[in-house]
Amino acid sequence: MNQPKQDWTESHLKEIIKYQKQLEYLPHDGMEMARIEILSKMLVFIGKLSGEFSEQYKRIYATRKRVHAEAYLAATKSKAQIAEIAVVDLREEEAVAYGNMKRWNNAFDSTREEINALKYKVRISIEDGSSRR
């Protein structure tokens, strides 16, 4: 028997907020390594949220397709229209889930790019000796 899947969204979001607050108190210059460490920890939870929302989107999509097919088969007339009406609410749910999925995928990509930019800045600092001042 399928047990309901636990929703980790709230706990992942709390972790992201905790790391974001740490970043707010950290100076931008001279603390690149610390920022990389915090952003890397944050990236783990952003990735988990991205995965959670991707899964939600796919589950709603699968439900919509099933309900559409069932309504289509059950209808005697105007099958396509009746099936579309049957899934209107699911389409709206799916749109919200898709937006959340895209938002967190974008956050993941942006955070990864920020980490890479900081790593590049550290590498340049080490090469030109500016990190030894």
Image (cartoon, rainbow, N blue to C red):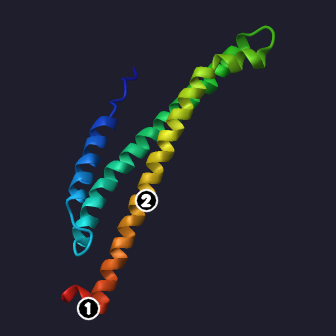
**On screen, residue 67 above or below 94:** above
In this orientation, which residue lies closer to the viewer: 30 or 70?
A: 30
- Tell me the quarter of the picture where residue 43 sits: bottom left
Residue where numbered disc 2 is placed: 110
Residue where numbered disc 1 is placed: 129
Instruction: Name which residue type carries label 1.
Output: Gly
**On screen, residue 129 above or below 86:** below
- Tell me the quarter of the picture where residue 51 sits: top left
Badge 1: few (under 14), some or many (20 or more) residues near its Cα, within 10 Å? few
Q: Is 78 displayed left or right of 110 in the figure?
A: right
Which residue occupies 25% across, 64% down?
Answer: 37
Q: Position of residue 122 (x, y in %)?
A: 30, 79
Which residue occupies 29% across, 85% down?
Answer: 125
Badge 2: few (under 14), some or many (20 or more) residues near its Cα, within 10 Å? few
Q: Residue furthest top?
A: 76
- The Cα atoms of the two marked residues, 2 and 1, are separated by 28 Å
Q: Residue furthest right?
A: 77
Instruction: Name which residue type carries label 2.
Output: Ser
In this orientation, which residue lies closer to the viewer: 86 or 125?
A: 125
